[in-house]
């Protein structure tokens, strides 16, 4: 019972914190430079990791799909199936997991240290809103970067998959690329972007919340970072199921209207 | 420009293990006065300071700063009030990502500071103020381009003071300003508290463990114990007090003074 209460308390606190961030974003004057700095910082810091992950995720999916497609002699569809899976499901999930481990943990540690060394209290006492000054640029930076990184990793993943498909199964790049439009529509791309944005909000929200509310010295910062990493991954898995259901319902509704 | 506590109570913890930190605490700090708050750890000294800047709200009672009840202030009013209260924290609390110059000038760039001014300060004017405050805390301009981790802890504390002084607050609040400092830097910081308070004619509240310093620079001393005010009076009255806790503080001060390099 205590665990359930603690989880509900945590989710409630997180929801109120994210609401506060959105309200501050709408209410206050936005300073574009720190937001752009954060986007550039997060994107450049995570690009190498995301690029490597993109290549190997694409390669793994090629190996898996080709085993199934070979049974039906339908390997020409490999490019389309592979890209669809990366855009809609695997890409957003892997990128958000990587962001949680890299940027999320860094942000929680940075904000947690600022909290326990009274830097956030000092900002407040100097008449500045810490949510506006510290949280908003990081929050927008992480969400925007997750979208940019998805697009980048998608392109890298397609290239990686194409190379593996060509070398391992002798599928020509034209064949690979030609099948993509049959499986990847604007809706598929929109679904991938939507999921990335939701996961980005989770990574940014949990990391900022845990860091901002850290207490109890170095131990407290360590606790905040661990909690941020575990809870982000847990919430992303739950959100994956919920967004999948939501997009399925949307898709069914749009087909019903079209029919 | 006074600070007034009226029957302020504050407790922490879950209902089954609630701990009362302040119980019906009332006192007033007059304009231009230096009040030292002493007490053992966990007796509510820092909690008292946090009530003044509105970071904490009392469970009951009222806190008035400059005649305004802190609990009644809206977000803008609270920001404005906080700007008038310069707070020096236990840690230097400098922003590591900014240079010393940007840290000291931080408060001069906020909307609250520029409110009511015909125009925001120019960069040249900001530089001028930063140089004045840095020299006021006996530091040199050479450190302005360095980042906080590149200077010593004692220097960081003094930069923190310069940052607090830059927006010209009406109240100065010090939360254990000499914690973690060597005896020589402690003496220098204590001298600066007195010098700044007298020179700038601001109302000061200092939370400290240092009875020696309190006796030499405070106008009045307040001792907190068991959630209540144990003593409130002048340094002379403190020396004459028969309270056991105050006697302990005085004995500790005498013992420190007899050590080579001990505080005054």
Image: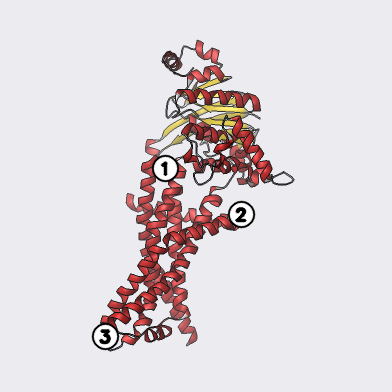
Mark 3 Cα shell of 10 Å, populated few (<14), some (14-19), many (≥20): few
Q: Residue at x 59, y 34 (%)?
A: B134
Does residue A4 lie above or below B104 as drawn? below
Q: Are marks 2 and 3 in contact (CB under 8 Å)?
A: no
From the image, tell me which residue sits under label 3.
A70
Mark with earlier residue (1, 2): 2
Q: Outermost residue, front direction?
A: B142
Which label number is shown at residue B52? none
Which residue is painted at 53% across and 55% down in the image? Answer: A136
For the residues carrying marks 3 and 1, which lies nearer the camera in this image?
3
Is residue A103 at all visible to an observer of this figure? yes
Question: Circle 2 marks a residue in which chain?
Answer: A
Please give the residue where the numbered disc 1 appears in the rendered image.
A215
Mark 2 or mark 3: name the one nearer the start of the chain: 2
Query: Real-space Cα distance between discs 2 and 3?
Result: 57 Å
Residue B262 pos. (x, y %): 44, 18
Which comes before the other along the chain, label 3 or label 1?
3
In the depicted structure, whether residue B80 falls above or below residue B229: below
User: Badge 2, how many Cα within 10 Å: few under 14, some, many 20+?
Assistant: few
Q: Which residue is mark 2?
A: A28
């Amino acid at each position: 019972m205590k665990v359930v209460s603690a989880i509900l308390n945590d989710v409630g606190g997180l929801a109120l914190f994210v609401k506060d961030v959105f309200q501050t974003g709408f209410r206050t004057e936005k300073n574009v430079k720190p937001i752009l700095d954060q986007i550039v910082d997060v994107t450049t810091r995570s690009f190498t990791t995301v690029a490597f992950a993109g290549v190997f995720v694409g390669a793994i999916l090629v190996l898996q799909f080709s085993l199934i497609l070979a049974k039906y002699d339908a390997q020409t569809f490999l490019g389309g199936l592979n890209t669809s899976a990366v855009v809609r499901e695997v890409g957003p999930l892997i990128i958000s997991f990587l962001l949680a481990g890299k940027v999320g943990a860094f942000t929680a540690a940075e904000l947690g240290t600022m909290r326990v060394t009274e830097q956030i209290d000092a900002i407040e006492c100097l008449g500045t809103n810490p949510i506006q000054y510290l949280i908003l640029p990081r929050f927008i930076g992480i969400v925007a970067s997750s979208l940019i990184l998805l697009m980048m990793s998608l392109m890298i993943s397609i290239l990686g998959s194409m190379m593996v498909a060509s070398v391992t199964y002798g599928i020509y790049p034209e064949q690979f690329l030609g099948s993509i439009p049959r499986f990847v529509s604007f809706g598929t791309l929109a679904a991938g972007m939507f999921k990335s944005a939701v996961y980005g909000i989770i990574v940014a929200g949990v990391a900022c919340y845990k860091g901002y509310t850290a207490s109890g010295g170095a131990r407290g910062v360590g606790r905040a970072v661990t909690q941020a990493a575990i809870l982000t991954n847990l919430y992303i898995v739950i959100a994956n199921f919920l967004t999948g259901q939501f997009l399925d319902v949307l898709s069914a509704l749009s087909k019903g209207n079209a029919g | 420009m006074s600070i007034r506590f009226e029957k302020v109570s504050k407790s922490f913890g879950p209902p089954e293990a609630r701990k009362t930190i302040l119980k019906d605490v009332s006192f007033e700090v007059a304009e231009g006065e230096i009040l030292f708050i002493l007490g053992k750890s966990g007796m509510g000294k820092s909690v008292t300071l946090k009530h003044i800047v509105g970071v904490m709200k009392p469970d009951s009672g009222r806190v008035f700063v400059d005649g305004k009840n802190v609990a009644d202030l809206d977000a803008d009013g609270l920001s404005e009030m906080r700007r008038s209260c310069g707070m020096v924290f236990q840690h230097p609390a400098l922003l590591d990502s900014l240079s010393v110059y940007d840290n000291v000038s931080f408060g001069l760039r906020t909307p609250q500071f520029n409110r009511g001014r015909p125009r925001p300060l120019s960069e040249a004017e900001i530089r001028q103020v930063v140089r004045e405050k840095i020299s006021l805390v006996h530091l040199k301009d050479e450190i302005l381009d360095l980042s906080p981790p590149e200077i010593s802890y004692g220097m960081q504390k003094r930069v923190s003071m310069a940052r607090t002084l830059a927006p010209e607050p009406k109240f100065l609040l010090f939360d254990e300003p000499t914690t973690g400092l060597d005896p020589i830097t402690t003496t220098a910081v204590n001298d600066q508290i007195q010098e700044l308070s007298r020179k700038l004619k601001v109302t000061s509240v200092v939370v400290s463990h240092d009875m020696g310093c309190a006796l030499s620079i405070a106008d009045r001393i307040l001792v907190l114990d068991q959630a209540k005010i144990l003593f409130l009076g002048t340094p002379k009255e403190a020396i004459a007090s028969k309270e056991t806790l105050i006697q302990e503080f005085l004995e500790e001060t005498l013992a420190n003074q007899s050590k080579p390099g001990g505080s005054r």
